[in-house]
Image: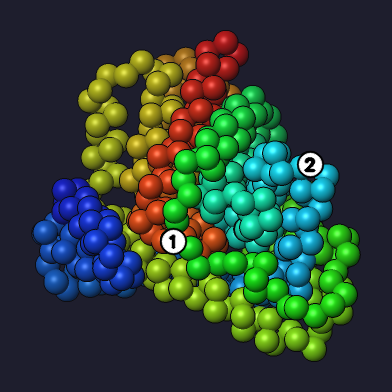
């Protein structure tokens, strides 16, 4: 399908939306207005602009549904006291000093078994917030630990982007996953260092979530095993795809984990009220994602992707450099690791092979490159992770460069490893 909107129009709309959000305009409305202005400035006309906005919103519906479904798990973990109990267990076993490292590792593990990064953050967030409350760690540091851990786990995970790059280069999926083990470790180490640094200087943050204060005050809280039952059930269900080839969508796995948590804690009579509480915590980000979809529709309908590909061709980069740079640019254009890596792999795999770049090295570099700019505001990951901890869009924008550094670490490490492979 030919582009309807110009690249500059789409970018102007995105910039306008970000400026309005920073100026404290309601984010959902700011995104809708930015999409409308971007489409019209991009030369699409009012009819085509509205049609693209609606189409983009439709494409965002799977993410919205999964976020809404996650409310059951969020409500269960918070109201049963499971999040607080797991936080106590983490602090008792590792100490407050290593709390951020534990959160980052937990998110890495959940992502590495095949869970989408945004879902991994949503799963770990209630526990992370409880840990932060116990030891006085600010929310931005907690979110950075989760985002960075998720990015580290993403490059060694059997997720759709790994599958796409493996198929494009005709490689075994496991080999692509194993090729980025060192980059994942490097990204994890940088995540811990950056989140520790952020915890020291970033003390003021707008947030609306306090999982400790919102837990039921009744006596007889859950044991550590009961508290962990819900998240373990989610991970087990989502792990069935890479282990047994049985696909259990997060739309099913997340609420199922919430029900497990409620049942093992003996709170089945409170199922409805807990689910309603959880829904109240995720409905805001769900609405925000709908607004995000309007901008995504304009970007998708623009010539941005084509211009990015043309830019790469005009830069006359060394053959090997095309692998990371292509996914860096295209993941930024789409605000999605999966979309960016898939487009880059389908477009440049043949070129890289013909140039003599080893397929495994090219695939690993391309996969890692997709984690640098994947959290831009016109994608779901940005808003889903902010909503998981109740962080304002403005503060999430301030945290964005740190996540970019984590992605850059895994990419640079992957390039270095690839050059010696």
Q: Residue 164 location, x and y as percent?
A: 54, 42
Q: Residue at x 62, y 84 (%)?
A: 276
Of the image marks 2 and 1, the number of the one nearer the N terminus = 2
Mark 2 to mark 1 CA distance (whole Å): 28 Å
Residue lying at 62% horizontally and 51% vertically, measured from the top left: 136
Q: Are marks 2 and 1 in contact (CB under 8 Å)?
A: no
Percent position of residue 291, x then y: 34, 69
Tell me: residue 61, above or below residue 4: below
- Secondary element under disc 2, as helix, strand or loop, is helix
The quarter of the displayed image where residue 148 is located: top right
How many numbered badges does the structure rendering display? 2
Residue 246 visible in the shown view = no
**Residue 225 picture location, percent across and down:** 88, 61
Question: Is 324 placed above or below 168 here?
Answer: above
Q: Give the residue number, with chain letter if any, for mark 2.
A: 94
Q: Residues within 10 Å of mark 1 (few under 14, many from 20)?
A: some
**Label 1, on which residue?**
206
> Image quarter for residue 364?
top right
């Amino acid at each position: 399908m030919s582009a309807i909107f110009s690249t500059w129009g789409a970018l102007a709309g995105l910039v306008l939306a970000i400026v309005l959000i920073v100026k404290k305009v309601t984010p959902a409305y700011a995104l809708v207005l930015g999409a409308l202005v971007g489409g019209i400035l991009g030369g699409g006309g009012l009819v085509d602009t509205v049609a693209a906005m609606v189409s983009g919103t439709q494409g965002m519906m799977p993410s919205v549904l999964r976020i809404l479904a996650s409310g059951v798990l969020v409500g269960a973990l918070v109201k049963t006291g499971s999040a607080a109990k797991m936080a106590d267990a983490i602090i008792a076993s590792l100490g407050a000093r290593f709390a951020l490292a534990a959160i980052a590792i937990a998110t890495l593990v959940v992502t590495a078994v095949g869970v989408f990064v945004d879902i991994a953050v949503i799963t770990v967030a209630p526990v992370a917030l409880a840990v932060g409350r116990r030891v006085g760690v600010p929310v931005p540091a907690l979110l950075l630990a989760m985002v960075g851990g998720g990015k580290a786990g993403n490059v060694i995970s059997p997720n759709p982007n790994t599958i796409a790059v493996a198929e494009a280069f005709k490689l075994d999926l496991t080999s692509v996953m194993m090729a980025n083990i060192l980059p994942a470790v490097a990204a994890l180490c940088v995540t811990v260092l950056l989140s520790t640094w952020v915890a020291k200087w970033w003390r003021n943050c707008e947030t609306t979530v306090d999982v400790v204060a919102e837990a039921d005050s009744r006596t007889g809280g859950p044991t550590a095993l009961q508290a962990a039952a819900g998240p373990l059930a989610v991970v087990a269900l989502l792990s069935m795809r890479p282990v047994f080839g049985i696909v259990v969508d997060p739309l099913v796995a997340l609420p199922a984990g919430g029900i497990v948590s409620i049942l093992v804690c003996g709170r089945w009579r409170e199922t409805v009220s807990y689910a309603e509480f959880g829904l109240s915590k995720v409905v805001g980000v769900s609405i925000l994602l709908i607004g995000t979809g309007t901008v995504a529709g304009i970007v998708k309908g623009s010539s941005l992707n084509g211009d990015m590909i043309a830019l790469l061709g005009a830069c006359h980069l060394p053959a090997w450099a095309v692998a990371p740079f292509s996914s860096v640019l295209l993941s930024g254009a789409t605000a999605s690791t999966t979309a960016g890596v898939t487009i880059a792999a389908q477009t440049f795999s043949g070129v890289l092979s013909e140039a003599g770049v080893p397929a495994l090295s090219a695939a690993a570099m391309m996969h890692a490159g997709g984690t640098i700019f994947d959290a831009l505001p016109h994608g779901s990951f940005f808003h889903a992770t902010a909503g998981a901890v109740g962080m304002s869009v403005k503060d999430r924008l301030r945290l964005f460069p740190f996540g970019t550094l984590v992605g850059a670490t895994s990419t640079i490490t992957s390039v270095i490893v690839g050059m010696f492979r």
